[in-house]
Amino acid sequence: MSDLRNQINSLSAAEKADLLDTVWESLEADAVSLTDAQRAELDYRIARHEQDPSAVIPWEQVRAGLFKGP
C-alpha cells in the first residue's frame, strides 16, 4: 500500500483529480447502495454547489481545522 501512496504522491493535482474521478466511478459501478435519505442529501448538496460553486471551503483549510489542537 505504501508503494501505491508513493505513486499517488508523485502525481500532479490534475492527475490526482482524474484518479479520484476514476475511483469514484468505479464505486458507482459497484452499485454502492444508498438509502433514500442519503441520496436526497447528496442531491441537495449537489444542487447547492451548482447554484454557487464558489461557496466552498478549500480542502486544505478543512484539513488544517481537523488537525489543529484544542
Image (spheres, rainbow, N blue to C red):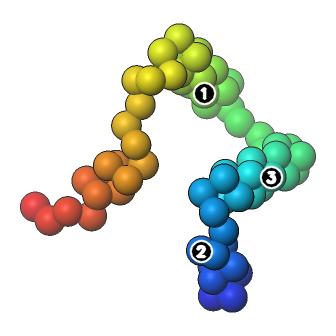
Q: Residue at x 69, y 79 (%)?
A: 7
Q: Nearer the viewer, residue 46 or 5?
A: 5
Residue topped by disc 3 = 22
Looking at the rendered structure, the kind of residue marked 3 is Thr
Q: Secondary structure at mark 2?
A: helix
Closer to us: mark 2 or mark 3? 2
- Find out whether the residues at labels 1 and 2 contact each other: C-beta distance under 8 Å: no
* Circle 2 Cα neighbour tier, 10 Å, few/some/many (<14 / 14–19 / ≥20): few
Looking at the rendered structure, the kind of residue marked 2 is Asn
Numbered circle sitting on residue 42: 1
Asked if residue 39 is positioned above or below residue 65 in the image, the reply reads above
**Residue 29, percent from left and from top:** 89, 46
* Circle 3 Cα neighbour tier, 10 Å, few/some/many (<14 / 14–19 / ≥20): few
**Residue 57, percent from left and from top:** 37, 37
Looking at the rendered structure, the kind of residue marked 1 is Leu
Numbered circle sitting on residue 9: 2
